Image (cartoon, coloured by chain):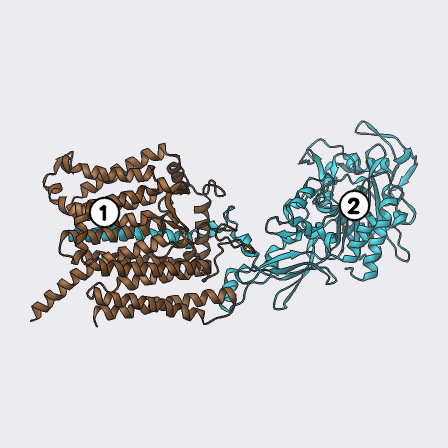
Chain colours: A cyan, B brown
């Protein structure tokens, strides 16, 4: 019997070798793919044990803070947002049951202090526990408050951007929501089902018809392509036929043969539609692309919370090969849908002498040892020549001095801008203003949109532009 | 150095393991080190020394390594349970004491284990009653009937039944092995046992099938039938008997896996646990996720994520806020791999392999057939039990709920396995004494 007993032992050893093999497969060889499995909540839960870095405003005000709960092995950190709704949409939230959105998601790696494998092993050997970096956002609470107060509860959005660096100083979407409330399932459910969609970040996701603010893009194409100068003239009579359909000026106003500066100052639709037709689809799309249209903005923001601006058929972005009424695209009609962020980028590009900077929601990272990393601004594209930008700057100053945008004027400072009024239905408009200040040395570019209002772009958004610009220029947090 | 002195010294690592483990858990959990952990180590060592004295008096020639190896496993289990829940560890410590008391009682009162042969049919009957008892008196856990409630205590009769069945099989096969071999005839290249002796074997096969369907416990069924096949093989030396038995078992299991929904589901989950990782595959998926977190060296004692962090004010462990289900029983191996890594897991498997080695060595040294078969059976069923649960947790085989011997939380398991160990040591003592006396006689 002894021989059999030895063989039996051998068999048991084979079984145990299998156990060893499988254990090493799961724990070492297949470990990373198991960790990446969607059903694996461990990494998410694990991050709760890490003291997540604070998110600060540009002036150091705490926007998001983590506080410990529980003790010992049960200790976790829970997120708090002391300023409540003020930064709800741009910053987002981070809760284990709710996931994360906004800056909390886009900068998650820095906030939880994720490093390379090698560095974290070194940290572990030294007995450091993982701590996240503090993120200083580019957002300025005074600008943010000014925008919220300016919109005064009306649905809409304001984006303010530093032309030379791309830093976003204000990003407001009304209705706002309080990120602290999201933790509760009932409150979250309520936010999710409201028709006004408070969780929807209008600044980056909202697709609005841009109305006459689009004429800045058309003017860029006209001037920079060399086909027009500020003195080029066209007829401003109304109505005229564009693509076989009659187009009128606002209020049916008649103009004679006028130059481009006059046409922009008074936002003459018929003039700009003709210009658009003369430029053609290819040239218009070329400049739209340079401005960042037809692609998601290069903002440090979750992809699903960013929308591309462009001409849409349903959810499909159209290209020059599609049938498009380019004359009406030139005046911001047709099926154009643009985000407030995109229009802020348009204003910022003109302000920054024709160069578009990639938009950023952060300025500074501070690691637990106090080492600081500053934002290095990156160029996105040279949209137009400096000459074109200077000509456009002058024309846009006229709009505020004597045209449709006088409500945006800031005393003692020259402002450049463009109004827009997109009629949604009879007497209901989306009111726009985009602009920058000071025109001679631009510190801030701002876009503003108010949804479904009876008012026009200039009178509705002009004052909002003014108060946000003043908040930033007086506070000294400009570029 | 005498065998018993070696045993005494071999207990020191176990005591150190308890002390070190408890210290580590204390440090992680409360950031301060009390002298409590030293007390636990001393208490554990004292218990082991008392048991050692019982062995020294009654079984002076028994294998010196079996008890220390088991003590290391028990120490491992205590540390893991203490890490999961101090209340569980306290309960387990009490079960540990009871296990050692029954271990000593078995050694002291059952003077000669060969007496068991005389009562083999009674023992077999007791075993079968124990097996089917939960079906009538118990309640199903995870669809299987495993436990009986006796007052406040939940008792798993299968744990004791396995000893009864092994004693019966060892005795029965020892008596019949001659006729099983001699009367065998060849059929289609296979050596078949004579039909009239096939009867009892068919009964055992039937019993395994009944276990499978009636008690709905694939794990115990595999364990029992595996031990049975091992004993048949050792008793007769005919691998063909094993093949026939295996075919019959697989055939039966296949048949029932198509007729019995719960067994079928177990197989489906085994083949693809991630298909429904949030539902039916949850347990095994979580087990693999926990092991993936462990890596080579593990996250350290007390660092495994077994409960939702922040599940505060939640005392109903483990029902409340558990991520890894049954971390104290079925999935304790996954927790070990998570916290101590591949090395920790390999160490556990290695200890079971060493215990198997000592057990089979005992069987080889034994003189008579019954002793050989008894030692083989006890060792095999213990080794298979460890394989069935670790294999389930690591997805080598479909997951079934048996305890990890000496490590998992559970009174029945601890107590039954200590009685099993007592029997094994008694066989060992007898055979090693004979070897020693022979050597002494030759020396003179």
Could you tell me residue B221's position as x and y percent? 30, 43
Vertical placement of B323 versus B36: above or below? above
The numbered dot on residue B123 is 1
Q: Quadrant of residue B441?
A: bottom left
Residue pictured at 26% horizontal, 59% vertical: B105
The front one of A332 and B211 is B211
Could you tell me residue A330's position as x and y percent? 79, 38
The chain carrying label 2 is A
Q: Quadrant of residue A262?
A: top right
Could you tell me residue B14's position as x and y percent? 34, 66
**Relative to residue A170, is residue B147 drawn left or right?**
left
Q: Is residue A112 visible?
A: yes
Vertical placement of A195 versus B151: above or below? above
Tag 1 secondary structure: helix
The numbered dot on residue A220 is 2
The reply to the same-chain question for discs 2 and 1 is: no
């Amino acid at each position: 019997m002894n021989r059999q007993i030895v063989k039996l032992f051998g068999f048991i050893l084979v079984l145990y070798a299998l156990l060893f093999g499988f254990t090493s497969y799961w724990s070492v060889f297949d470990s990373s793919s198991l960790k990446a499995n969607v059903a694996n909540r461990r990494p998410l839960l694990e991050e709760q044990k890490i003291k997540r870095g604070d998110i600060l405003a540009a002036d150091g005000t705490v926007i998001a803070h983590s506080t410990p709960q529980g003790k010992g092995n049960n200790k976790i950190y829970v997120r708090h947002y002391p300023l409540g709704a003020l930064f709800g949409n741009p910053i987002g939230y981070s809760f284990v049951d709710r996931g994360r959105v906004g800056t909390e998601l886009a900068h998650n790696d820095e906030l939880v202090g994720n490093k390379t494998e090698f560095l974290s092993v070194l940290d572990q050997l030294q007995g450091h526990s993982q701590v996240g970096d503090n993120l200083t956002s580019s957002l300025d609470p005074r600008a943010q408050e000014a925008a919220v107060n300016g919109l005064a509860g009306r649905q809409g959005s304001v984006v303010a951007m530093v032309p030379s660096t791309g830093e976003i100083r204000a990003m407001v979407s009304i209705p706002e929501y309080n990120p602290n409330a999201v933790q509760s399932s009932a409150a979250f459910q309520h936010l999710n089902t409201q028709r006004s969609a408070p969780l929807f970040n209008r600044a980056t996701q909202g697709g609005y018809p841009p109305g006459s603010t689009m004429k800045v893009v058309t003017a860029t194409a006209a001037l920079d392509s060399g086909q027009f100068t500020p003195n080029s003239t066209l007829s401003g009579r109304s109505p005229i036929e564009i693509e076989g359909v009659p187009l009128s000026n606002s209020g049916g106003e008649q103009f004679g043969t006028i130059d481009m500066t006059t046409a922009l100052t008074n936002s003459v639709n018929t003039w700009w539609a003709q210009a658009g037709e003369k430029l053609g689809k290819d040239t218009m799309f070329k400049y739209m692309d340079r401005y960042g249209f037809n692609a998601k903005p290069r903002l440090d923001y979750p992809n699903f919370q960013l929308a591309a601006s462009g001409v849409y058929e349903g959810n499909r972005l159209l290209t020059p090969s599609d049938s498009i009424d380019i004359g009406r695209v030139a005046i911001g009609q047709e099926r154009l849908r643009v985000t407030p962020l995109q229009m802020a980028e348009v204003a910022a590009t003109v302000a920054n002498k024709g160069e578009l900077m990639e938009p950023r929601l952060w300025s500074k990272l501070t690691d637990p040892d106090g080492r600081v990393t500053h934002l290095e601004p990156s160029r996105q594209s040279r949209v137009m020549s400096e000459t074109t930008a200077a000509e456009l700057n002058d024309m846009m100053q006229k709009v505020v001095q004597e045209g449709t945008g006088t409500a945006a004027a800031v005393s003692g400072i020259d402002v450049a801008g463009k109004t827009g009024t997109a009629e949604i239905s009879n007497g209901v408009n989306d009111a726009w203003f985009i602009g920058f200040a000071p025109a001679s040395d631009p510190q801030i570019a701002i876009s503003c949109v108010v949804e479904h209002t009876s008012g026009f772009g200039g009178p509705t958004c002009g004052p909002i532009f003014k108060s946000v610009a003043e908040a930033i220029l007086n506070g000294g947090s400009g570029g | 150095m005498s065998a018993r002195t070696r045993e005494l010294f071999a207990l020191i690592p176990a005591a150190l393991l308890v002390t070190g483990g408890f210290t580590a858990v204390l440090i992680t959990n409360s950031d301060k080190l009390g002298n409590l952990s030293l007390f636990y180590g001393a208490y554990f060592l004292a218990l082991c020394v008392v048991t050692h004295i019982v062995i020294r008096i009654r079984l002076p020639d028994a294998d010196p390594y079996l008890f220390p190896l088991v003590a290391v496993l028990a120490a491992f289990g205590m540390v893991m349970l203490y890490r999961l829940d101090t209340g569980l560890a306290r309960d387990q410590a009490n079960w540990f004491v009871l296990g050692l008391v029954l271990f000593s009682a078995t050694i002291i009162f059952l003077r000669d284990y060969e007496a068991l042969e005389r009562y083999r049919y009674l023992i077999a009957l007791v075993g079968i009653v124990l097996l089917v008892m939960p079906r009538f008196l118990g309640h199903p856990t995870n669809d299987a009937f495993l436990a009986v409630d006796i007052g406040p205590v939940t008792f798993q009769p299968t744990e004791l039944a396995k000893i009864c069945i092994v004693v019966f099989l060892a005795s029965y096969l020892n008596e019949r092995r001659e006729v099983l071999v001699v009367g065998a005839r060849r059929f289609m290249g296979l050596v078949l046992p004579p039909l009239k002796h096939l009867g009892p074997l068919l009964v055992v096969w039937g019993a395994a099938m009944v276990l499978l369907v009636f008690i709905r416990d694939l794990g115990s069924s595999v364990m029992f039938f595996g031990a049975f096949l091992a004993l048949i093989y050792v008793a007769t030396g005919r691998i063909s008997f094993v093949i026939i038995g295996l075919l019959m078992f697989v055939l039966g299991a296949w048949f029932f896996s198509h007729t019995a929904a719960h067994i079928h589901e177990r197989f489906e989950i085994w083949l693809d646990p991630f298909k429904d990782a949030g539902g039916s595959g949850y347990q095994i998926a979580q087990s693999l996720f926990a092991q993936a977190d462990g890596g080579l060296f593990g996250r350290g004692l007390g660092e495994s994520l077994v409960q939702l962090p922040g599940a505060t004010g939640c005392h109903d462990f483990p029902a409340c806020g558990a991520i890894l289900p049954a971390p104290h029983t079925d999935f304790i191996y996954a927790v070990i791999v998570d916290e101590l890594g591949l090395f920790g897991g390999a160490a556990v498997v290695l200890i079971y392999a060493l215990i198997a080695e000592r057990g089979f060595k005992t069987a080889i040294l034994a003189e008579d057939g019954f002793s050989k078969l008894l030692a083989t059976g006890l060792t095999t069923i213990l080794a298979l039990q460890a394989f069935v649960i670790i294999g389930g947790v690591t997805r080598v085989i479909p997951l079934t709920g048996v305890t990890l011997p000496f490590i998992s939380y559970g009174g029945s398991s601890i107590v039954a396995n200590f009685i099993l160990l007592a029997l094994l040591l008694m066989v060992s003592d007898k055979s090693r004494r004979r070897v020693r006396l022979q050597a002494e006689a030759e020396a003179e």
